[in-house]
Image (cartoon, helix red, strand yellow):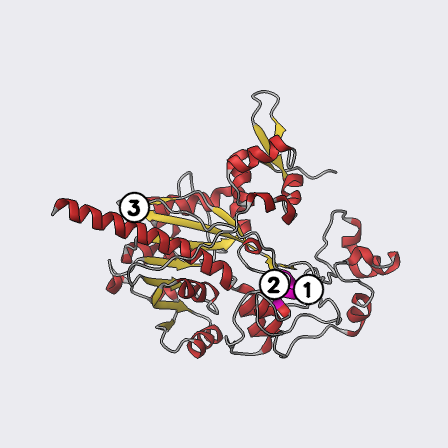
Amino acid sequence: MKSKKNIYSLTEFANLVSVSKETLRRWDKSGKLIAKRNKMNGYRYYTDEDLALCDNPNLYFSEFKHKTNYVVPFCYYKSIELFAGAGGLALGFEKAGLHHVLLNEIDKQACKTLRKNRPNWNVTEADIHTLDFTPYKNKIDVLSGGFPCQSFSYAGKRLGFNDARGTLFFEYARAIKETNPKICIGENVRGLVSHDKGRTLKGMINILEELGYRVLPPKILKAIYYNVPQKRERLVLVAIRNDIKTDFHYPESNDTIYTLKDALKGGTLYENDVPESEGQQYPKRKKEILDMVPPGGCWRNLPPLVQKEYMMKSYYLGGGRTGMARRIAWDEPSLTLTCSPAQKQTERCHPEETRPFTVREYARIQTFPDSWEFMGSMSQQYKQIGNAVPVNLAKELGYSVIDFLNRYTEEQTAKTAFVS
């Protein structure tokens, strides 16, 4: 039985692959990526097969312009970050020029990581349900966070603020209501776009609009186009207060694709080779199997009998599943890191040694600086790193936030001067 293919409109597909609709039209016209046409109305549409083709970096090169997103803040812009984790998003925003007045995280070891690396940050280790954000009312510019959505459910035709009570997204929304920031930046996994057939994301947007914010179309940012040697994708949700008419511009993509070699060896991305550190090991039989996989290969490179042994029932399901028994090559970006480097179905094996990446190698692939220390057990450190937003991606997004605030500040200054 064939599985049903997902169909994407021009707008939906543009958001998924992080390019403009005009770019898709150019690709269609030039033959780089030819859209399907609806026989009734002639409208372009795309399928999952087209989505897979967009994993090829070469498709994008001619669209990219080597441009820096760097911008200098005009003012001392203040930020609150929720669900801060090990600090990937917060550190990137700090590097861009934002100043954090509060970070909230419930995980004990992640909070130790934040305090160890940034003793000056105001880190609140607490259940977000217990926090009162009203002291920051009208005193911050940005509220950000990677809100979890596991407990979020869509109720009725329109989910309102009070209907979401008890969920972590409600707490994110409550923080917005109590602080009234100029701009809110939410980030999540790409799967949120299709969760519950899109109703979950629609409900979140409804709530933000109810609170007095205009929400930009959600955007999928591919980390490899923002100086990150990893094929990681994050959904970004931007909400701007209704009284502010300033436009927000997502960061420009870079034309350099960094690879695993750039992450672990000294060069452009890092000055020196990755420091030694502890790391997990594979069980004996798994190591014997992965020894047979060449760099850039996966389970399909194994002998047929070993494929069946390793894949078990999955062997008969068809499809790619190229993340299983995967050994990353030096000359390619890493696949998305997970919270556990040795778990089955998402192997990320070192290109030369048959082992998972070490803690510091994990951190490099997520573009944390070598000076950023992670607290807790080895498994807790892997979890913190695997859950993080890549620092370089966060920095580029932070530049877009500062650019927005700079232009808003200019507009307000001009209005004041005109009135006076």
Tag 1 or tag 3, which sits nearer the N-term? 3
> Which residue is more in the foreground, 345 or 36?
36
* Label 3 – label 1 distance at C-alpha: 43 Å
Q: CA distance from mark 1 to mark 2?
A: 9 Å
Task: Indicate which label's residue lies in the foreground, 1 or 2.
Answer: 1
Residue 304 in which image quadrant: bottom right
Magenta-highlighted residues: 259-263
Residue ID for mark 2: 338
Residue drawn at point x = 59 percent, y = 77 percent: 378
Q: Secondary structure at mark 1?
A: loop
Residue lying at the far left in this picture: please name it: 420
Judge by depth and name the residue closer to the eye, 51 or 82. 51
Q: Nearer the viewer, mark 3 or mark 1?
A: 1
The residue where tag 1 is placed is: 348
Q: Is residue 104 visible?
A: yes
The stretch drawn in magenta includes residue 314: no
Residue 151 position in % (x across, y down): 47, 55
Which amino acid type is marked by label 2? Thr
For the question of whether residue 35 can be seen, the reply is no
1 and 2 marks in contact (CB < 8 Å): yes
- Magenta stretch, overall SS: helix
Query: In the structure shown, which secondary structural element does the residue marked by tag 2 occupy?
Result: loop
Q: Which residue is mark 3?
A: 212
Question: Which kind of residue does numbered mark 1 sit on?
Answer: Arg
Q: Position of residue 1 (x, y in %)?
A: 74, 38
Disc with the residue nearer the chain's start (3 vs 2): 3
